[in-house]
Amino acid sequence: MSRLFLLFAIALAVYLLVKSYRRSSAPQAKPDAEDMVRCAQCGVHFPKSEGVMAGGHYFCGVAHRDAYRN
């Protein structure tokens, strides 16, 4: 009878260890994706928040914005 309790205790311990391992190795949430835009001057794609917008067009920098205007 004591062997049965010992076997049950071991099985319970293994079950709890496996359950806690699965919980800790859950997949991480993906970061939010950001829209990409294309520079009207050179065609390079870059994150929208890093660009310069002028006249309805996005540019990768102030120099390309100025070059596009001329």
Image: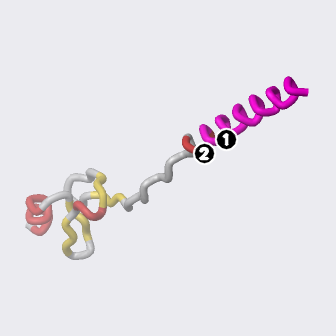
Residue situated furthest front in the rendering: 2
Residue nearest the viewer, comparing 26 with 5: 5
Q: Is residue 10 above or below residue 19?
A: above
Residue nearest the viewer, comparing 52 with 13: 13
Count of number-bearing discs: 2
Residue nearest the viewer, comparing 17 with 38: 17
What separation in Å lies between label 2 and label 1 (alpha carbons)? 6 Å
The x and y percentages for residue 41 are: 20, 58
Task: Name the kind of residue labelled 1 in the image.
Answer: Lys
Which residue corresponds to the image point at 32% horizontal and 60% vertical from the top-left? 37
Which residue corresponds to the image point at 86% horizontal and 26% vertical from the top-left? 2
* Dot 2 and dot 1 residues touching (CB under 8 Å): yes
Q: Residues within 10 Å of mark 1 (few under 14, many from 20)?
A: few
Q: Considering the image in quadrants, where does the N terminus appear?
A: top right
* SS assignment at label 1: helix
The x and y percentages for residue 15 are: 72, 36
Q: Is residue 70 above or below residue 60?
A: below
Residue nearest the viewer, comparing 22 with 30: 22
Q: Residues within 10 Å of mark 2 (few under 14, many from 20)?
A: few
Which residue corresponds to the image point at 28% horizontal and 54% vertical from the top-left? 46
Quarter of the image for residue 7 reads: top right
Which residue corresponds to the image point at 8% horizontal and 66% vertical from the top-left? 70
Q: Which residues are magenta?
A: 1-21
For residue 19, the mark is 1
* SS assignment at label 2: helix
Q: Is residue 26 above or below residue 56?
A: above
Q: Is residue 61 above or below residue 4?
A: below
Task: Name the kind of residue labelled 2 in the image.
Answer: Arg
Residue situated furthest top in the rendering: 3
**Residue carrying label 2:** 23
The x and y percentages for residue 18 are: 67, 35
